[in-house]
Amino acid sequence: MSRNILKSSLENASFNIIFQILFRCVTFVLNAFIIRHVGQEVLGIMNVRLLLLESTILFLSREPLLKACLTDTKSHNWAQVINQVWLSVPLSGLLSTALVYIWLNILSSTDDKYLEQYRIGCYAIAVSCIIDQITQCLVLVAQSYCFVRLKIIFETLYITIRTVTFVALVLYYPNHAINAFSIAQVTSAIALCSLYYGFFYWYIRNFNRLKENQKKDDNITFRNETQMALFKDMQDFKFTSVLDFFPAYMDNKESFLNKDLSLLTVSFAKQSVVKQVLTEGERYVMTISPVLTFSEQSMYDIVNNLGSLAARFIFRPIEESAYFYFTQMIKRDQSIDKQDQRLVSEAVTVLSQLCKVVSSIGLVVIIFGNAYSHTLLYLYGGNTLIATKLPTILLKCHCVAVLLLAVNGVTECYVFATMNNKQLDR
């Protein structure tokens, strides 16, 4: 935590933007591949029905805990934090059981030819979500200690593994595309979990070795600058073994969970339910109501994804880094006049500049998006997407919404990073 928080947040946002562009380019090509080789109905099942199941499980079981635990990480009792983050594993298990039952038995069914694949897909999503939650404590530690490049490298590998696995299986078994999707989800989740645990095993082993050498010789010399940087950056690192990332293992003289952190988590949980419904509202409507076919759902999903490119490419990485930055600069339970005014002033300046930057981006999207919506849809899906005017009108509306999303996202980060639990509840 001796690193500069603002610098680390800016680096994190920059790398995340690059990653999002790479990820969306891959998704863009992948969806075009699916439309041409598998069909729109399969795309609708995967991108609307199955990915909605994944986002619901992950968001409700992960978001409240991570948001609460990122608050003022310098003051953490890490034993309590690790215990709390691991609550997401049984929570995701309970949510998976309930939601998979609803997805299989209550929601409208798929065609008989896809029914068995769809069933396997639901179970695969549940398994991959639980594996993802097992990794969350390491993701939290990596972000708290400003391991900026680590997340980007691992998520790039994660997307690569998932995409290569899916495409390879579809090319060999084109009639089992949903099964290929399921295998790719589980495989990539296992790979990401292994990468994180493997990295921290290596990192802690090297750090422990350096500490032992320093005890023997105060004038320890480092073989290279990387080793020296490793040692300096890890001075405040609280973990001495990979087992420390598991619940109830670290030495803890206080209670099993932190009461204030738990109350904050409950407040974020209430907010997360509402936010998830609002964010994915149209997908829930399409999933629950039989008004749209899977082909029509895939059409809407394509336009929706194209319309939110700026939000996903640029705004989301900025918001994630901004939230972490504000949580470290402003204390939740202290009035502004009692806090370090230098930090408060810096946070105000950063918020002001961020609002200007994202507003400018939003205006650019409105101007060029409205002019080239028809062209973009044609390049993406061919004549299928421009057969009627509705997709073009929908995409133009998305462009206007981008400006509102831009301002809303950054200001929301500041609000949720600085409110106490009573204000969050209200």
Image (spheres, rainbow, N blue to C red):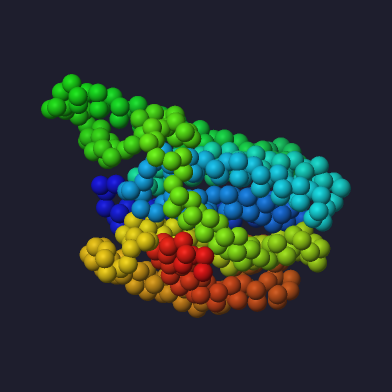
Which residue appears farthest toward the top when viewing the image? 216
Q: Position of residue 159 (x, y in %)?
A: 54, 45
Q: Is residue 371 left or right of residue 48?
A: left
Q: Is residue 105 visible?
A: yes
Q: Is residue 199 left or right of residue 266?
A: left
Which residue appears farthest toward the left when viewing the image? 219
Q: Position of residue 381 (x, y in %)?
A: 67, 62
Q: Residue at x 62, y 72 (%)?
A: 395
Q: Is residue 208 above or below residue 64?
A: above
Q: Quadrant of residue 322?
A: bottom left
Q: Nearer the viewer, residue 307 or 278?
A: 278
Q: Residue at x 59, y 53 (%)?
A: 60
Q: Nearer the viewer, residue 246 or 401?
A: 246
Q: Position of residue 160 (x, y in %)?
A: 54, 42
Q: Is residue 353 above or below residue 74?
A: below
Q: Residue at x 20, y 29 (%)?
A: 222
Q: Nearer the viewer, residue 375 or 151?
A: 151
Q: Quadrant of residue 150?
A: top left
